[in-house]
Image (tube, helix red, strand yellow):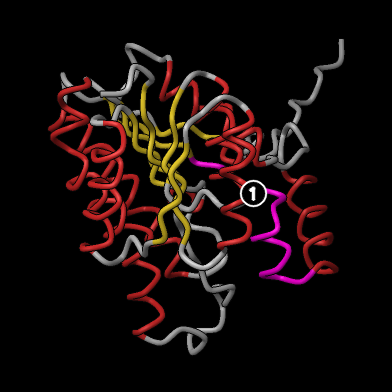
Amino acid sequence: MSDRKVAIVTGSATGVGAATALDLAGRGYNLLINFSKSEEEAKASAAACNAAGADTLLVQGDVANDADCRRLAQAAIDRWGRIDALVNNAGITSFAGVANWDALDAATFERIYGVNVIGAFQMVRACLPQLKAAKGSIVNVSSVAGALGIGSSVAYIASKGAINSLTLHLARTLAPEIRVNAVCPGLITTRWFVDGVGRENAEQIQAQYEKAMPLQTACSAEDVAQAIVWLVDGARTTTGELLMLDSGMHLGRATPLPVAST
């Protein structure tokens, strides 16, 4: 069995997943790097983690497929004999907006739900015995969409609301052995967002969102990773938390109270 702790980060080829894996590598974790399609980016992510001192294992797999989830967990067990942390980061959307009711068909809705919610559940189930033995930690990457009902599509919004509820349920049922939390970012300035809406639209949307946020800044992948790693590797008394990482967007813009004249 490895002396170093072991983390599985799904969807860790790029963006938040890659940033989280790299941060955990620097904190003494070995990493299972998971990808679905982005093999070259996943290799780069693994190389960066190796350079930070981690032993890494690159495993392709679709978390919506239960057999793939079990294969990911078993690969980590075969390599290191333990799983201390699971970060359910893999996620997809359809940038369909919320006003066009014909933009989503049932198959797309089911695919988004399958990756974002069922995939997280299946990964937890596959890793559960090792996480219990390690008194480990689970972090689900959700979104402010699940709390505010706004986002790239109604399917994405519904899936993130579901992952929030799943987080609370797991936190209750897996205590005291396992801590379970979620991070709920707002707008994240990653390639995933830019590619989804186009660069020109991305700049406009970012400007609009930042204007509406009390802190007036969007998240970076590194911002989100920092919070995930704190929940994984620290936060000893924190479970069932849905941590908002949205620069205060969920608060709305405060309206100053009028100053009374004297």
Question: Total number of numbered labels?
Answer: 1
The quadrant in which residue 155 appears is: bottom left
Foreground pick, 148 / 235? 235
Classify 61 as above or below 85: below
Magenta-span inclusion, residue 253: no
Amino acid under disc 1:
Ala
Q: Quadrant of residue 159?
A: bottom left
* Residue range (magenta): 184-198
Residue 190 shown in magenta: yes
Drawn side of residue 69 relative to residue 139, left or right: left
Q: What x and y, as percent, mark residue 103? A: 52, 86
Q: Residue at x 73, y 63 (%)?
A: 194
Q: Above or below — where is 163 with respect to 234?
A: below
* Quarter the C terminus occupies: top right
Under tag 1, what secondary structure? helix
For image coordinates 77% across by 71% down, the residue present is: 198
In this view of the protein, which residue sits in the foreground, 65 or 145? Answer: 65
Quadrant containing the N terminus in the rendered view: top left
| Residue at 32% over, 12% down | 237
Q: Nearer the viewer, residue 254 or 259?
A: 254
**What residue appears at the point 43 percent right and 44 percent down from the top-left corner?**
57
Where residue 208 sits in the image (x, y, percent)?
78, 54
Q: Position of residue 18 (x, y in %)?
A: 58, 44
- From the top left corner, tell me how far across and down residue 189 is, in percent: 72, 50
Taking the image as shown, residue 229 lies to the left or right of residue 81, namely right
Residue 239 vertical position relative to residue 200 in the rendered view, above or below: above
Residue toward you, 159 or 214: 159
* Residue bearing the label numbered 1: 44
Residue neighbourhood size for the residue with mark 1, other residues' Cα within 10 Å, grouped as few (<14), some (14–19), many (≥20): some
- Residue 128 versus residue 237 in the image, above or below: below
